[in-house]
Amino acid sequence: MLIASSAFLFTGSLGAEDFDSAYGAFMETPGASFFTVSNLWLCISAALVFLMHLGFSTLESGLTQSKNTVNILFKNVFIISMGILTYAFYGFNAMYPGFEDPASGYFALGSWFDVTASMEYMSADYNNYTWYTDFIFQAMFAATAATIVSGAVAERVKLSSFMIFATILVTFAYPITGSWKWGLGWLDAAGFYDFAGSSLVHGFGGFAALACVIVLGPRTGKYLDGKIKPILGHSMPLATIGVFLLFLGWFGFNGGSVLSADPYLVSLVFTTTALAAAGGAIGAIITSYLSLKKPDLSMALNGILAGLVGITAGADKIMPASAIIVGLISGVLVVFSIIFFDKIKIDDPVGAISVHGVCGIFGTLAVAIFSDAATFGAQLKGTLAICVFAFAFSLIVFYILKLTLGVRVSAEEEANGLDLSEHGQEAYPSFTSNAS
Amino acid sequence: MLIASSAFLFTGSLGAEDFDSAYGAFMETPGASFFTVSNLWLCISAALVFLMHLGFSTLESGLTQSKNTVNILFKNVFIISMGILTYAFYGFNAMYPGFEDPASGYFALGSWFDVTASMEYMSADYNNYTWYTDFIFQAMFAATAATIVSGAVAERVKLSSFMIFATILVTFAYPITGSWKWGLGWLDAAGFYDFAGSSLVHGFGGFAALACVIVLGPRTGKYLDGKIKPILGHSMPLATIGVFLLFLGWFGFNGGSVLSADPYLVSLVFTTTALAAAGGAIGAIITSYLSLKKPDLSMALNGILAGLVGITAGADKIMPASAIIVGLISGVLVVFSIIFFDKIKIDDPVGAISVHGVCGIFGTLAVAIFSDAATFGAQLKGTLAICVFAFAFSLIVFYILKLTLGVRVSAEEEANGLDLSEHGQEAYPSFTSNAS
Amino acid sequence: MLIASSAFLFTGSLGAEDFDSAYGAFMETPGASFFTVSNLWLCISAALVFLMHLGFSTLESGLTQSKNTVNILFKNVFIISMGILTYAFYGFNAMYPGFEDPASGYFALGSWFDVTASMEYMSADYNNYTWYTDFIFQAMFAATAATIVSGAVAERVKLSSFMIFATILVTFAYPITGSWKWGLGWLDAAGFYDFAGSSLVHGFGGFAALACVIVLGPRTGKYLDGKIKPILGHSMPLATIGVFLLFLGWFGFNGGSVLSADPYLVSLVFTTTALAAAGGAIGAIITSYLSLKKPDLSMALNGILAGLVGITAGADKIMPASAIIVGLISGVLVVFSIIFFDKIKIDDPVGAISVHGVCGIFGTLAVAIFSDAATFGAQLKGTLAICVFAFAFSLIVFYILKLTLGVRVSAEEEANGLDLSEHGQEAYPSFTSNAS
């Protein structure tokens, strides 16, 4: 019965008379109460997921050298801003057309998001949130894929090429795989399950990152004479702030993915999310202690994230005791994975490929392992399809960028740091202390 | 029917029998459900707005030199603490008497806030939140004006004089202009609209800041021999943390200003707020790239804030596509404004006058431009009235302080830094790193 | 009518048919609306309390030397992770069996928490939140006690021994005193009141800290030749971030302790909490200014925390005007207490004993002083019982650890910093600035 002709795009209020009266009537129905609290919870969740971008910013900054800090912060400011805008202009409607025919559920063209803010959408039978809530919650997810890549290519990627790549990835690639499941496409029809995106967000980002790192090569001096030279970060407090904020934001990332304020499901998801994160930390602490003989803070931090990525696909289906095990395994896995990638000279300064890619696949499979074994095939097929697509898409696009604009700064620029060479700014210009 | 004699001020619980029974009856009514979730949302919003004070603290610290960091943090701790208290003692009841006669709507005396926590106030017909919620949500806004000034006068203001000025500004001046609109005073009667305070909070703070900077003068060495010498900040990570926290807090600042959990309005406000912030970042990035030839992080950060300030007056009336344009324009505006003020030797270390003052005015006018052109006159009159009042009030009070106590530290104290001269403390006393 | 045999622990979903139908029926009842919003508020509160652990991490890091920062961050990551897990495995069911016979209310054995996620528990008559919500909210509190100790023993404690101690304290000791009141044990029967834990959380943590500091001794060089040598922290911005995040988290700590979304109570608690924090800051600023002649940032920060601890026991019973006074007194108290403990050579780098221990006792008594004088005896008995138990338990356990594993690093390790000696990592390895 409603609304939203293109006239609404630039002026005027949505308060068309028929919308107002239909909305007023809806708010008097018994379902309006649950609708209102659910809608509020998704808005708050969107804010929490937004905060994850600060988490990524500080984590990535902390684990890299101070001469590249401005560059990292700039990339993250750009990604979230660009991500929200392109998702409005194209991505949201590409990802959520809701394929009616699964056979056609491989690709949909996007468009400006704000064309069907209809009363039908706001109905307790259909959804428990408004069109705008749906958009803003999903928009906060969209930029995450590029943010994950940002960490893996840090300290040597050329800013302009990265900005182009990130824009293409978020705008076009992310909604394609997203629509396969959440747009009711072919993977949804195949019985694939991915609650909040172990594969659709984290696996996607992690394998996009892997492709980019392969094209880009390691940081200069990282692998010399067959030896691995650690290039340490510049601030463990920043990194720790990042992980705690990501942990916090995950309550919205997973909790909001309930898509309502259903008391049982929201509280179960909070519980499994926190238990898996705690399990991840303990798993990584023990593993790193046994293999490195020291209680390693970076590994503990990556363990938390690994546990969170691991539980994301099944946070609403995996019971608490299993959530702890999913976390523990993720925490073990991430340590070995980080060591492994370093050995094969895949230089990932923040461990993003291991945390998001490897644990993303594991988490997707964990839904079958810990909840319904019969779905193992569908889960495997789904996670591989998504990760292979992300990898291939990124490999092609980033390789084309390499051949054309170049994707890497010069050796001199890398040595001087990207802050000076790309931005002409330093992160700590007037910082003075009793440093000795 | 209720309650709250002065006996309640210091002892005893509100659990007077008649309140308890009236409240119990109210909670059984159909409206109680919407009241409860709306009240909760405003409490959560108050917490989000509170967090903006941390955002301001880290932003201001990051963009200034490390020798003045303790001073800046102290000022911000003082402002929020003082602000909450004076708002309880005087401001809240000065701002929200609810003028019954608009002709008298220019000034109201304040008083202790806790005198009418009445059942009447808690009623779905009248409000969707309790008296205490109203107070705490508005109290978190009140200190913002002084915080904005704090950034502009940083690195050379005398602490004691600033504390006195901030107290007077928050306690007496802010509620006056606030009451003109939100207390249903003369500007409200004139059809002026300012949803969450582009003028009433940000324009007010920005123009108070301008007056103080004029009285105070620039930092020593900033303008030498007709040249502008940049005085760089000490931590871009701190500044970035600040802007992300402010962005997050704005979901409460604007989202809470719906004054209920109305699903449509809250989600629309979240969407326009985020889109304007993203537009602001992109607008400032492009503008600064074209004019400075480098992608500038400080400008990107100020662009986000500019977009947020710009959308604040009409976040519930301006549609998403227009919100992006409001953001873009704000982002362009803030870059030129910062350059302009620097040229005319108005030294504002954090760009507060441009972000809050200039974009505050633009945002207020944007309501007319993008929603209802007929209101342009009322919007212009309102924003000018508020900004001129804030400027004049601050000019007079700060000038009197200059003549009496002095408002500026000595040249020697400024050179040594306010941390040592005002506090005898350093921000990073035992900090050691591999600094070279 | 329900569910949760041990089969649920590792596989399967809770979706047993009888649960599903009972839950579906419940969600149709009139009470479901209030239940849903209350449950959501407690989940959000759990997230806010979680964030307090980041607050503690950055506060403790900021107030200590940079050579011990990795160690501090690691301890805090470990504590929250371990705390959530042991609370699931043992603590929750030890703390909340709900003693039916107060005479037996001194001790209960714990067990895996997830055995009675029953429909009975989810009922507006009994509770306004699910079993999982109850767990996750309380789990976030549990680790706090150990975190408080962490600050007091910083810069010289042996990591392995501290980890063992913290685990024992959180797992076994905290639920014992917790059950005395919140598990409806003997103190509850005695009329003791402690709304959100001035004694049960903060007093407990503070006096556990005091015992550990006595066993551990001061940092080397702190008390030399009868003089007190200040050992300054390394980052006041980190400390300030910590206090603001703790203030924010306290809205969940106290606000969530309403245990529902009751509009009147939640908003009253938000108001008293904020007013007490503001009062604490002002009290500490004035006191430190009068005694130290400088406006001291550390004291202002501790004043905020003191005010928050002080109001915690009675945030729902103490009226706003009294809350300010509770805050002011706490702010004065914390300054004198910190000076006092330094004089008697109790070396507490972050002031945890004063903030949490001393103000925890005061806050518990403040419930009687400012709300119901007749309860003074019960309040005094309760707070002493809890603090003495925490002190004695910690003294014994930590002393046994001292005799066996040792609790202190060597003098050389202490001089080099715990980051290198315990972790082989630095907090700021690649940090470079224009430091001079």
Image (spheres, coloured by chain):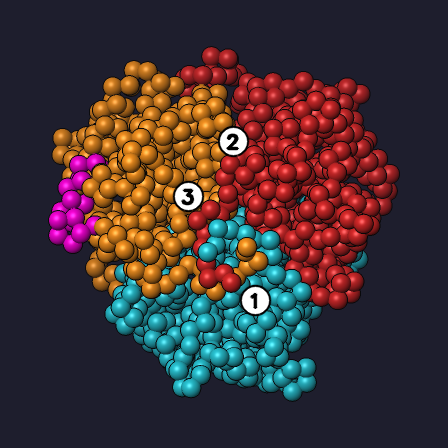
Chain colours: A orange, B cyan, C red
Residue C258 in sight here: no
Residue of label 1? B68
Q: Amino acid at mark 3?
A: Leu
Residue C326, horizontal then vertical, whole percent: 75, 53
Residue B319, horizontal then vertical, whole percent: 31, 61
In the figure, C343 relative to A195: above or below? below
Q: Nearer the viewer, residue B251 or A250?
A: A250
* Image quarter hosting the N terminus of chain B: bottom right
As helix, strand or loop, the secondary structure at mark 1 comes to helix
Which quarter of the figure has residue C380?
A: top right
In the figure, B80 relative to C358: above or below? below
Which of discs 3 and 1 lies nearer the camera? The answer is 3
Q: Nearer the viewer, residue C391 or A97?
A: C391
Residue A98, horizontal then vertical, whole percent: 22, 38
Q: Nearer the viewer, residue A243 or C276?
A: A243
Q: Amino acid at mark 2?
A: Pro
Query: What secondary structure characterizes most of the magenta part?
Result: helix
Residue of label 3? A232
The subunit carrying tag 1 is B
Label 2 and label 1: CA atoms lie apart by 36 Å
Which of discs 2 and 1 lies nearer the camera? The answer is 2
As helix, strand or loop, the secondary structure at mark 2 comes to loop
Q: Amino acid at mark 1?
A: Asn
Q: Which residues are magenta?
A: A390-407
Q: Callout 3: 10 Å neighbours few (<14), some, many (20+)? A: some
Residue name at image x 26 percent, y 50 percent: A157
Report if the CB atoms under discs 2 and 3 are less than 8 Å apart. Answer: no
